[in-house]
Amino acid sequence: MLNGSRRRWGLAASFAAGLALMSPAVAQTPKTLKVTMHADVRTLDPFWTTQTIAGIHGMMVYDTLFSSDGDLKPQPQMVDKWDVSADRKVYTFTLRDGLKFHDGSPVTSKDVVASMNRWGKRDGAGKQLFGYTASLEAKDDKTFVWTLKEPYGLLIESLAKIGTSIPFVMREKEALVDPFKQIEEVVGSGPFAFKKEEWVPGSKTVYEKFAGYVPRKEPPSGHAGGKVVKVDRVEFIWLSDPQTAQAALVAGEIDYLENPQPDFLPILESTPGVKLEQHPAMGTMGIIQLNHLHPPFNNVKARQAMYHLINNADYLNTIAADKKLQKLCYSYFGCGVDMETDAGSEIYRAPPDLKKAEALFKEAGYNGEPITILHATDHQYINPANLVMIQQLRKASFLKLDVQAMDWGSVVSRRAKKEPPAQGGWNIFITGTSVLSSSNPITHVSVGMGCDKAWFGWPCDQKFEDLRKQWAFAQDVDTRKKLAVELSKRAYEQVPYISFAQWVNPVAYRSDKISGVLPVPSVPPMWNIEKK
Amino acid sequence: MTTYILRRLLATIPVMAVVALFVFFLLHLTPGDPAAVIAGDDASPAEVDGIRRKLGLDRPIWEQFGLYVWNLLRGDLGTSIFSNLPVMTLVKQRLEPSLVLAVATLTVAVVLAIPMGVLAAWKARSAIDRVVMGFSVLGFAVPVFLVGYLLIYVFAIQLRWLPVQGYQPLANGIGGTLRSITLPALALGMTYMALIARITRASMLEVLSEDYIRTARAKGVATSSVLLRHALKNAAVPIVTVIGIGFALLISGVVITETVFNIPGLGRLTVDAILKRDYPIIQGLIILFAASKVLVNLLIDISYTLFDPRIRQ
């Protein structure tokens, strides 16, 4: 009896010991952040494509020389200190200590120089910067010198840019790859390391905390400050169906949803434990792009006539019905940002006037030729925006519309055609841009009027381009704001495109499961987030 | 029999050649440009041209077709334009979820639909028959995404019994796989259940009116034996055909179910590739789907011989 009891106690003790041995394993269960971004990571080279999702992937894996803080002001990130010569043409940068790539090799100035050269061949702001660059050289392992031909005022801002085509620092080996070809390996020096063996394009992308990352000492703000990683692993789970994505957040299967569809926001708002968050500069602006190469919109009068047909507010109610998400914006550079201005917008603010529109089309020599509209029917906001525009234009019975329905992939292909509409070209298509990109007249590519070098639609106006250049050379915000007013007036006269609306897509996350989400207008950072 | 199988296999070669030719030219004549998608919305036309050149999309179409056929003959389905991964790697990643979903869906459908169809035929024109046929009409009429959302709402959000989305690989344990596949298999199984139940009923009704069934009944054979051993076996040929074709369709085209339940299967891979104009993936998948359909048809034909010895002769 005693023996039996002892045996039982012995077994119980062994079981307890076994549990005790198992418990550390339980404690070591990796903290995994499950996130659904607005798109799936399908391309690993953030210079090869300008898609924002490639920038989000890049921000996980790579580091940047400068970053934008919560107020969108540039702050040093990989750079420790820098000097600017008195003539503002020579910038000398020193990298901070402790920077290393995920393979353990140190980050050197050579990596930086090669990376910036690669970025400068693909990004609009980068090309602009390199247009004014005399030389970019590594002085020693930690110092590099950027010499300008002229005192271009946007060097630091360009290096701190977020959104698309972020100037990440890669290893020299990858940075020397032709920027029109994809890199093979993803080895960055950022706070997370990419797990290629777990990558399933169209489904899941996995990152692990990089233990060798040395964060800055400053508190985090936007994309700047200390990138302190508080989870072991981040999984980007691609949920292409918006309904499923919101259900997964409600059920707690994901922690963070970058781009919930506006229709589902009331459900998410009323779900206990779910929080919606937005940054003041967050949002999208609609663009009705006109083709300046062919009649009728090769005549400025016809472009101006469009202001009398388009009612800005109608788009907001269709795309984002919730008033909290709407901003009736008349600024070519977005609302809620430094460069916000509605100078020259009187023509657009007036209620639609068919007679004025008809008179202007007549002055432009319009004689009932078909106006070809490329209507993308498969896009979340471009499709409804097209429907609203077509309805507004149909009220003008003097216009003959040729609406061609197609998928977005076909629109992006067809919009590149410069031929007349009857030969496969086009007159109008609708797209959108982030407020962040449009807040800077240089990075706002669709407002540019550089003729053949301009964006699709090819607007052409030397005066506007001269003003853009002056803006780029301005050394302070006040001067830039004054120039933005002039740019806005000229844009309203020349009509590079018609902007409509501004609406916000807040992020949604489980505030009962995670904390430390940093509000940013685009490219959400995954550092600083703690899993409870 | 062996000669028959070999002859059928050889006949697939011209079929596959026609499919390859058709797919290539159809894709390249369709509007759309992967270079423009890669470049993104902010890219200039010159950048788009640069990417197109690097991808070789500016080469003459015959040159591109020659390269495609040459690679195909070497068993190389190509590399995805976007992910830079071999198409075969992407297919392997997606094959297991698609197969598991197909098997689970057909299991749910067959296990429930065949008894329902047999019962409806046995009790033809009765209340049971009407209920079964009513369910069958419902199964056809209600869209799979609606069934999917309803199942998610009840079982994943309200009751929290099963996950909303995602697929757990078999390597992580069969329990997780079953949990992740239950709702999609039920949602998708509704349509197949309706189809198989109707076919079973129609086929059984035809067989039940045969003389040998009357003879079996006259001999006093038990009803269950008459239904299952005499009637169902003879009614099996059209049922097996529907199940086989259903399997082939499930492997290649259940994109809505895969999207609603976030199952990383071949259907979604195909549609995503089409939307992005990722030509190598589309071409590779259509070739594989065509091959799988030919193979399934062959297996269906062989299975006929098991149910009907006359076909063997």
Image (cartoon, coloured by chain):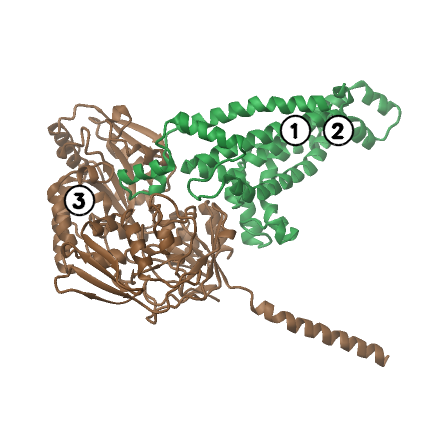
Chain colours: A brown, B green
Query: Which quarter of the image is occupied by the N terminus of chain B?
Result: top right
Chain that bears disc 3 = A
Name the residue located 81 percent from the left edge and 32 percent from the top edge.
B224
Dot 2 and dot 1 within a common chain: yes
> As shown in the figure, which amino acid type bears the numbered disc 1?
Arg
First in residue order: circle 2 vs circle 1: 2
Dot 3 and dot 1 within a common chain: no
Q: Which residue is mark 3?
A: A349
Q: Is residue A257 shown above or below B69?
A: below
Q: Which residue is mark 2?
A: B122
Q: Is residue A453 left or right of residue A267?
A: left
Name the residue located 39 percent from the left edge and 61 percent from the top edge.
A190
Name the residue located 51 percent from the left edge and 25 percent from the top edge.
B19
Q: Residues within 10 Å of mark 2 (few under 14, many from 20)?
A: some
Name the residue located 54 percent from the left edge and 49 percent from the top edge.
B166
Mark 2 or 1: the one toward you: 1
Residue farthest along the front direction in this orientation: A140
From mark 3 to mark 1, how far is it between C-alphas? 62 Å
